Image (cartoon, helix red, strand yellow):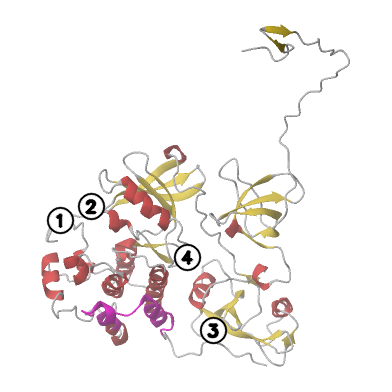
Amino acid sequence: MGNCCNPTPRSLGNGHVQASAPVKTSDVTLLPMDTRPQIRAQAVIKRVRAMYDYKGRTPDDLSFVKGEILDVLDMDSDNADWWRAKRINSNSIGFIPSNYVTDDDENKIESQEWYFGIERRDAERKLLWVGNEVGTFLIRKSADNKAYALTVKDLNKETNEHCIKHYKIRKMDEGGVFIAARRPFKSMMDLVRHYMASADGLCCRLEKPCPKVPATVPFKQLEVRRSQVKRIRRLGHGNFGEVSAGKFQNSVDVAIKSLKPGTMPPGAFLAEAKRMHKFRHPKLVQLMGVCTDCEPMLIITELMVNGSLLDYLREKKSLERFPFADLIDICAQVAEGMKYLEKENFIHRDLRAANILVGENNEVKVADFGLAKEIKVDDTNDGADEPMKFPIKWTAPEAAFKREFSTKSDVWSFGVLLYEIMTFGRVPYPSLSGQEVLNKVSGSYRMEKPSSSSGLFHCPDSVYGLMLNCWDRDPERRPTFEHIYHFFDEFEIANEPSYKDVFS
């Protein structure tokens, strides 16, 4: 290889060459090369404000604190969870989780600290958290999406128990909003400021917005390195393998499922995991990432602190204190998650209390959706002595006999899950083996309405009627999860109006 500083000879033809004239360099001044990273001016897509603190997980993340203002430079359509952003007063650039920020617009209702894009039941659950004092509030869209609602935590002076009050916020034709017609306001912000200064007919004065809990942030890439994941404590063992609580990058709490070697083909599982990784719903346990480079394969999900719904219900049964309204709320939450999967044309295949996970304040989420699709099933066990790999007692006849799984077979399983919830975790078909269950339900046999001689629980006729509808022999006659969700979401716990009136 030649020296790039030597003059290059010029060919004269006939094999002769003429040397080039020497280059005079005495008058040339060579400057040192600038090796600093060059920051190119980039167009700002929008300006956002941080709703929470965020500590970067990787070197290309941008850390920030609550209230900090950032400029968004890139919103990757292939990964809407992460945006490329820049601090407004520096050249620091990196990735930020999109669900940690909101538009920096003080006139936009959705950008306010007191606005929550959630439904009524979720609003009640958040406000009833133990740490929230009387007067804690939030504003949300009303059920018909045509107006807003103010939801407030109050104290029932007769029972000395906390309760939730709802007030409809109406819009005026000429602009502005009001709760009481006698007291109109130019904006929602003016309304909130007024009722934070004075109750003025509400159940109490508004004290502070309900605290917001950061949503789960999925990893940027589905496949992660094993060295990034650390197991801390064993949580249990299921059909798929061992489950542990752990950390990702020593900072993010996660659940780690270690699949039994040979449980499922890596290629088929990875293809299914890619689809599951894109699902985003507050009632689904978020798939964070996977490790498929070698056995055992790892599934990394968000951590739910109170474990499975089955264990949770049995613990509550032993304590003999669990309001019936909370059972209905759990049913509504599960149905909401399944409604999302139904809309996505995704079949769960293994819906039961053991695969519903519980967080804080009775929040539940659907877990292990889709995993049963690629599992290597041993369905020869009759369920008499050994735990079944194939959940026969929860499986619709057409799925058990003909492997015809569908959303409607998930609805059948939901009916059995209802039985588990209403009985605080009782085993369905307690006196029958798995094979006996298959033989009987393929005919006209159905479980009787759950009852308790001790009075610990009761199952309303309307709920049992829904169970029977879920167990219809004809899959097409079973209800949709959309219908089931609205059944429980609108279930009347007490004879009280949906919204409170404001008194003078």
Query: Is disc 4 surrounded by few (<14), some (14 to 19) or many (20+) residues within 10 Å?
Result: some
Residue sitting nearer the eye, 423 or 263: 263
Name the element at disc 2.
loop
Count all numbered tags in the image, as a single digit: 4
Q: Which badge, 4 or 2, comes first in the chain's sequence?
A: 4
Check residue 282 in the rendering and tell me which mark sits there, or answer none. 4
Q: Which amino acid does label 4 sit on?
A: Pro
Residue 314 at x, y percent in the picture: 29, 66
* Disc 2: which residue: 376
Q: Which badge, 3 or 4, comes first in the chain's sequence?
A: 3
Please say whether residue 76 is one of the residues in the magenta stretch: no
Alpha-carbon distance for marks 3 and 2? 45 Å
Left or right: 484 as drawn, with respect to 87: left
The image quadrant where one finds the N terminus is top right
Alpha-carbon distance for marks 4 and 1? 35 Å
Rendered view: 275 above or below 419: above
Query: Is disc 3 surrounded by few (<14), some (14 to 19) or many (20+) residues within 10 Å?
Result: few
Q: What residue type is labelled 3?
A: Asp
Left or right: 472 as drawn, with respect to 362: left
Displayed quadrant of residue 6: top right
Residue sitting nearer the eye, 43 or 457: 43
Q: Which amino acid does label 2 sit on?
A: Lys
